[in-house]
Amino acid sequence: MTEKQSDQPRVVDLSKSPHARITPVSPLAVTLGGEFWGPRQERNTRVSLLSQYQQMEEWGNFDNFRRIRNPQLGPFRGKVFNDSDVYKWIEATSWALALRADAQLQEKLDTALGLIEAAQCDDGYLNTYYAVERAHERWSNLRDNHELYCAGHLLQAAVAHHRTQKNRRLLDVAVRFADLICEVFGTVIEGKNPGIDGHEEIELALVELYRETGSIKYLRLAEHFIDARGYGHLTGGWFGLEYFQDHAPLRKQSAMAGHAVRALYYNTGAADVFLETGDRSLLNTLETMWSHMQGHQIYISGGLGSRHHGEALGADYELPNAQAYTETCAAIGSMMWNQRMLAATADARYADLLEHTLYNAMLPGWSLDGKRYFYVNPLANDGNHKRQAWYECACCPPNVARTVAALSGSVYSTSAAAVWVHLYASCDAQIELDGKVIGLHQQTRYPWDGDIEITIDAEHTFDLMLRIPSWAATQTQLSINGKVVGEELTPGSYIKLNRAWRAGDQIRLSLPMPVRVMESHPHVLENTGRVALMRGPLLYCIEAADHPGVNLQDIELANSSVQAQWEPELLDGVIALRAVGKLPVPERRWSNVLYQERNGAGRQSSRDVALVAIPYFTWHNRNAGPMQVWLKQAVTEATYG
């Protein structure tokens, strides 16, 4: 490789973070291939990023920048935070171009950079909503108008662009703005504005800018924003202080509350601060909140945010299916938080949730053709919920794009004398460790198949840490060069393989993927008597397209085996689950009757129906129609294969 490995750009650069136990590798060190992630990453570059650029032209995002120098273009268009969509698109495009050159995309990136440079004020300020007729209103409504949120996404875009494109065009813009923010914000004792933004983002962005520039003032301001929240700065909003995580200081919270995306970004920023400062009180709090989330607040999809009202997390066990909000951005926020927690602890449970969220909460937000998106991801639907090419509030599409563009950086991490394998995907990697380059060739059909083959291209002694997913059954097998490894393979942990590796050494990991039938905690009342299907890392659902003329709410999973079948012509090729379901024929009629006295009578009869379940991330890629994740279970106990 032409570039020194240690100089390759990372999405989250923890290479010098003193409290990171493991360090994610550069996305440029890993080339995704195979039939799953390789084509999706290419589609992101070839389709999604180009179509998103066109959408932003049509919706006025770029004109908002042009009007700074050309007021005749008219008033500001769209949401007050529309600048952030441009910045996320730039971040995604920077990583996409670092992986593979594309002249058309490069031209559009350069156009966007020119618009941003021209829009910056002389003092460094940059926000197109406030730049012309509202210039005198700067920082006047931090609660609602997202000035620091937009600034945070600018900083992240600038860092990504600088790391991947090796020039300072956008970084210089970002540094000037960040310096202004440092002058304006801080404590009253310092004579500064003590305010905080209603939407967290600036916190984690400032830490990454500190990592890029080495300027400690950015880290100190990130700490300030973390610590200043929770004292009632953001009063007067529609949804109360919890909505903004401003109801209590972070270290006094034991559970996430309020707007899901904001809470997850806040926790991500706090984890970033811990990785640099080692403030154990932050990590302890985050671990407590994470454990509470896992036991009380998270959907089986990994989605977070149960309420449309306030896009909020909701109460414990408040997990409605059809009304689930589970914003795609919340899934991405969860992935970012889990990546930091994984780096801080090397605990496999964070990698487990990162993978689970990737497949079942983030990926459903992106259509198979790369052109349409879900903002909200319900777990049941009557057919009215549809993917859209864009949204008036379009935070999710470019968020998906930046996640997919840099996904290869989440596959592996390193620590002293160890390479950690978090995600299984066909890929080639060249990873620097102890001054040597470790070649890893991973071949697999995962997530459709649990057989993984990793070939070593190195002459070096190091630990290879393989994640055994928490869903993996006890029949998991591992061998090196054909010899079975005798150590116990514990689901939800990493197994350490230590040896003097030789070029051509081959590791084979077999993760059986039986169909798993899942049930909810009994306090999730909506799922009483219902089950959901999973196989490997994937959640499944049933869709009306496969059950014409049948009300999905009536289908019961019956006493029959569930068979997993590869179906290459279905939804670009998926493993579908097929079984015999039951359609009960009730003894009493319910036509125009909502409630009746129970008389104890059972069903007269039922008829069989062919039940087809598809991966949840693929629903609504054929046509609009009803969908269900949680299925009624027949009274008799079912068996599953």
Image (cartoon, grey):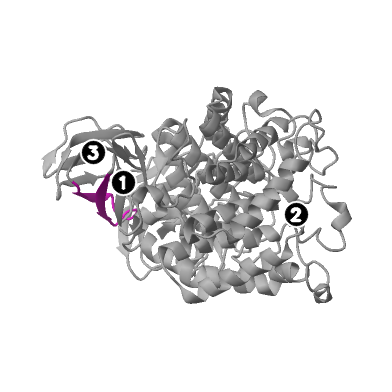
Instruction: In this rendered view, identify the residue nearer to me: 551 or 488.
Output: 488
Could you tell me which secondary element the residue under label 1 belongs to? strand
Q: Residue 31, position in %: x, y?
A: 34, 59
What amino acid is labelled 1 in the image?
Glu
Q: Is residue 452 magenta?
A: yes
Q: Is residue 2 left or right of residue 286?
A: left
Q: Is residue 329 left or right of residue 176?
A: left
Mark pair 3, 1: CA separation: 33 Å
Residue identified by numbered label 3: 475
What amino acid is labelled 2 in the image?
Tyr
Q: Say which residue appears at 39% left-offset and 68% top-offset.
A: 572
Mark pair 2, 1: CA separation: 40 Å
Q: Quadrant of residue 471?
A: top left
The stretch of residues the image draws in magenta is 436-458
Residue identified by numbered label 1: 432
Q: Quadrant of residue 239?
A: top right
Residue identified by numbered label 2: 125
